Image (tube, helix red, strand yellow):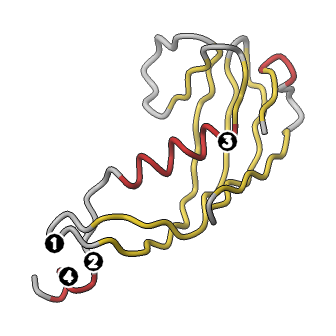
Amino acid sequence: MHIPFRRVTSIPHDFDETQDGLNLKGNVVFMQRAEARLIANLKGDTNVQCYRCGDEFSLNINENLDFLVYDGVYKGEELDVIELEDSIVDFSQILQSEVESIKSDYHLCENCKDND
């Protein structure tokens, strides 16, 4: 699901995106000029790799997200920013990006946690 940035208004626009057993649900609301606020919850299970032994295991995710969505290149100081290149808010791409970010983190499987 995606919407043009120009359609994001001061009335929150709800979205609900599901992919591969993960669900991103929340809303996006216009703030000023080229800025909007995206508040959502990412929930579900995904497979990750243990950084110690290399085994794959299922990780339960339940994270609250709060991003500034900026139409263009952001030059401010806020850290959690989604920059739009084509003036389209693509919730599917945001979901994929968050999942890849989580997968790239260091995760320990239960066996390695017990052997610490």
Residue where numbered disc 2 is placed? 109
- Name the residue at 51% across, 41% down: 97
Residue position marked by numbered label 1 in the rendering: 53
Pointer 2 local density, CA inside 10 Å: few below 14, some 14–19, many at least 20: some
**What is the crowding at mark 1: few (fewer than 14 residues within 10 Å), some, or many (at least 20)?**
few
Q: CA distance from mark 4 to mark 3?
A: 33 Å
What's under tag 1, amino acid-wise? Cys
In the picture, the quarter occupied by the N terminus is top right
The answer to the question of whether label 2 and label 4 lie on touching residues, with beta carbons closer than 8 A, is yes
Eye-nearest disc, 4 or 3? 3
Q: In the rendered image of this protein, does residue 27 appear above or below residue 86?
A: below
Front of the two marks 2 and 4:
2
Residue kind at label 2, given as amino acid type: Cys
Say whether marks 4 and 3 touch (CB < 8 Å).
Answer: no
Residue lying at the far left in this picture: please name it.
116
Q: Position of residue 99 (x, y in %)?
A: 49, 51
User: Which circle's residue, 1 or 3, is located before the other in the chain?
Assistant: 1
The residue carrying mark 3 is: 92
Q: CA distance from mark 4 to mark 1?
A: 11 Å
> What separation in Å lies between label 2 and label 4 (alpha carbons)?
6 Å
